Image (cartoon, grey):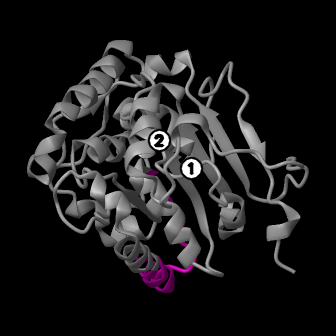
Amino acid sequence: MKQTSLIEPGLLSFRRYDHDAQSTKHRFGMRSLLRLGLAPLGRRVVGSQEHLSSICRREHGLIIVLPGIEGSSTVNEGIVQGLIAGRLSHSIHVMDWRRFRLWNPLHLAMRSHNRLQAERIAEHIRTYRAQFPDGAVHLIGHSAGAGMALFVLECLNDLKINSAILMAAAISRDYPIRGLLDRTTLGIWNFYSPLDLPAVGLGTMLFGTMDRRYAISAGALGFRQQAGEQAQEISRPVLHQIRFSLHMVKAWNFGGHFGWTNAEFVRQHVSPLLKGEPTPNSFSGEIPQTFAIPSLFVKG
């Protein structure tokens, strides 16, 4: 049975991936899960990712991964590995937006710094688009990084990116996300899980969300649907809310705070979204909540 290359030099040591071998998929997911134990060591245990920003890759598009309060670590390394395994040829850039390196919930409270970092990332996107006007751009944010992804969208003004993926978002459920949908061409995906209440429920009630609300986050229970919102204008970008379900365990996502970042889950469920491909069995048994942009936010 033919095997195909999975990981480029300089990253983790899983060199091969057999798409027909279930045992290989299990090893890929298990390895990613075990690597989470090294997350407190930060970037010291993450291989070089410079080659993922090569000119050749930049010509295919740009994916910006925004980590949570842990910064560059094996948590977001799992996301990167899943994207590569999903055969995405884009440039992949993990951007650490924190003020200091320590894994600390105070990163959530640094409002002025966080807004400045959002503008810095938005400028990075503008620079990329100036060089590659037709290049696809995607944002992937985990935990506090999901809130940062929304802040970046706020800074883009008339510039559109392709999509934003929010994982376990540490942002309030009433955040006006629907006003940002028209900053994308494909929409925004919010992956959330009630099993994540200890982190983005109790945690954000104690330390606050990225938009400084002391409440349960959208990463635990999803964004609230405002009265009268319906998915009537299907031609417009929409908010896709994907709740954790038990079939996702097969992809090594057990519904906790880091389940969404497992490399095998990203390979199966996230990579196809960025390529605009259907995701067979990805959300079977789950009817995503999909909301169109309210007319309040539609420009003239």
Among the 4 quarters of the image, the one containing residue 63:
bottom left
Identify the residue under disc 1: 275
Q: Position of residue 185 (x, y in %)?
A: 68, 63
Q: Let me know if residue 117 is in the magenta part.
A: no
Q: Amino acid at mark 1?
A: Lys
Relative to 3, 205 lies left or right:
right
Relative to 81, 241 lies left or right:
right
Which structural element holds mark 2? loop
Name the residue at 43% across, 84% down. 127
What's the magenta region?
Answer: 123-141
Which structural element holds mark 1? helix
Q: Let me know if residue 131 is in the magenta part.
A: yes
Q: Which image quarter holds the C terminus?
A: bottom right
Kindly check if marks 1 and 2 are in contact, taking CB atoms under 8 A apart as contact.
no
Relative to 289, 23 lies left or right:
left
Q: Position of residue 45 (x, y in %)?
A: 10, 46
Q: Position of residue 229 (x, y in %)?
A: 85, 50
Among the 4 quarters of the image, the one containing residue 106:
bottom left
Q: Amino acid at mark 2?
A: Ala
Number of labelled discs? 2
Identify the residue under disc 2: 168
**Near-viewer residue (174 or 58):** 174
**Near-viewer residue (295 or 176):** 176
| Whether residue 272 can be seen here | no
Which residue in the rendered view is the most extreme toward the top?
23
| Whether residue 233 can be seen here | yes
Relative to 18, 151 lies left or right:
right
Vertical side of 117 occupied by 224: above or below: above
Name the residue at 39% across, 76% down. 112
Name the residue at 34% across, 75% down. 113
